[in-house]
Amino acid sequence: MPSLTNHLYLFGEFSLDAQGRVLKRAGATAPLTPKAFDALLLLVQNAGRVVTKDELIKTVWPDSFVEESNLTQTIFMVRKALDETSTRRYILTVQGQGYRFLVPVTESANETQEREAPGAPADAGSIPETPSPSRRRSVIRWRLAIIASVAVAFAVIVASAIWLWHSRRAAAEPGVKIMLAVLPFENFTGDPGQDYFSDGLTEEMISQLGDLDPAHLGVIARTSVMHYKHSQESIPQIGRELGVQYVIEGSVRRDSERVRITAQLIQVKDQSHVWAREYDRDLGHLLELQGEIAREVADEIESSLGGGRRIEAAQGAAVRPPGTGSYEAYDLYLKGRYLWNKRTAEGFRQAAGYFQQAIDKDPNYARAFAGLADTFGLLSTWQMGPQSELMPKARAAALRALQLDEGLAEAHTSLALIEENYDYDWPGAEKEFRRAIQLNPQYATAHQWYAEFLSWQGRFDEAFQESAQARQLDPLSLIIATDHASIFYYSRQYERAIEQCRSVLELDPTYSRAREGMIPPYSQLGRYGEALDEINRLAARGDTPALWAWEAAVYARSGRAAEARRALAKVEQVAASRPDRYTVLLVAYWGTGENERVLDLLERAYAEHSPVVAQMKVDPIYDPIRSDPRFQDLLRRARLDR
């Protein structure tokens, strides 16, 4: 923990009470998670100095090993609490080093001392008229830091000017990758029911730009940019959080016949508008318009860097056609993707209906078939319906999509999911994952699912590499970050699995999958009280058979037999009719130590092609039966004995 010697710190509109662990703004408490508080306190106590990433990690997580991404997420939460949406910013990212707190800080030992009339953050030069000796030293350090910062900034500007002057006369150096974020297009129709259209346009622009030249132009995935829908974050803040040099902002208006799209390309470092256009077209020309915008954006990015030949050479082949000449089919497809991205059972079912309507409009629309495959595949693997019904539908849709367009990465990824979770065809699944990533290296979901595949094979080093790639492409995705925790769990790194889930909850305390993800590692560590705490927190939002199963397991393993029996009875009463019956019963019987029933369930799960079999090689709940001949035979039949 940072030192609490002077426990009240005043800066800008804020006061930070180190002893009480409270951040206030104009007298009102500002929400701040414990880890974010520790990070902010260290930065405030070292105002004007660069606090290295290593210092922050060692202070905030003193007894844990965490990755740099955890620190990035924590700083993100600090910036949220400080409401860094105006031009004046409190925290500066110093690339490759760490972070610097920018505004002057007044220290006080009187925890009740606060400003009676808080205002805007103070200027760097404003200091008290009668400062204490410690305050004078702080001001001197601050002034020296400002002078040093100005000198460094001037040097950077000069160097940048020289580099830009040179680069405009020569192609950019090979290997340099530009990162871009397409912010959610604003829906200016006045009808919230048209959000699917503006969100769909955002996703299309991400796809179009991502196809141009993946080796030199990286585009942040949809999940992360949707975080900024209707938000007020500044362009520099978004650039820092996503690690991009450029952003695209846009808006959409449409009526029954025409669409008006405005788009502007902004350079993050100086917020300069590199390019801006307004398009007013018939709706029937929307499909061609998206490719046109993508090409113009690429041209402007490259011309601003002087390396126009790189992406320009790729444009002719790289911009993927929309796959249909029917605007009606395309509009239905957008509605389907909008609902699919909600990742709920009802959203999936509605999405399947829209994808099918798109296919009815255009029977040769490959992307609509890929959407169907994605939908049925996730309904099955998330155990929201019978595998025997959903997986054959998913396979038929994926194969038809590839028959129409072999170069569709989404369809290859869906086919890999089927071969992995239903066929247990590991070589076939790996071939499809690799093909998808070859076709679209920026498809974060392919990297995410491939990482999961590798972890189930016990290839953890490769799994972490793929997961890291997915997180770079989609840095604010909660599901990708939670899946990263699952790899820690399967590799028996239980403490790190818990810490990773906590970092996700710091981003979104309501995200249930991350809270669920802490229960298995707590249980494996014998920390049953903490496991029950998480179960109770989840149950307060809605009791489920999955929670009853973990209750039965945790109660049994902690010696509370009567409570375990009651929870198990509840599970057994409802499990038979549920698509996730094997998952809940396997957990419950593992906890109660009924190994023969676990083996019987796995036999039935294998016969019914349940996705629970895919995790059998690495899931710690099977450690008590791992040497049993029946279990070894199951591994062999599922081709998991290699």
Image (cartoon, grey):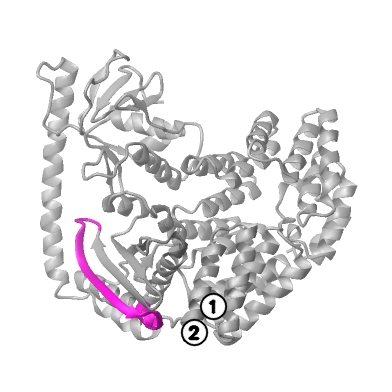
Q: Indicate the position of residue 81 as horizontal and vertical percent values.
A: 36, 37
The disc labelled 1 sits on which kind of residue?
Arg
Which numbered disc, 1 or 2, marks the residue closer to the eye?
2
Q: Nearer the viewer, residue 231 or 196?
A: 196
Residue 245 in view, yes or no? yes
- Residue 630, percent from left and from top: 88, 56
Residue highlighted by disc 2 = 324
Please state, as top left, top right, bottom left or bottom right, where the N terminus lies in the image.
top left
First to last magenta residue range: 268-292
Q: Residues within 10 Å of mark 2 (few under 14, many from 20)?
A: many
Q: How far apart are marks 1 and 2 (CA)?
A: 9 Å
Marks 1 and 2: CB-CB under 8 Å?
yes
Is 285 magenta? The answer is: yes
Q: What element carries label 2?
A: loop
Disc 1 target residue: 367
Position of 466 relative to 44 (above/below) = below
Q: In this view, does 172 lie to the left or right of 200?
A: left
| Amino acid at pointer 2 | Thr
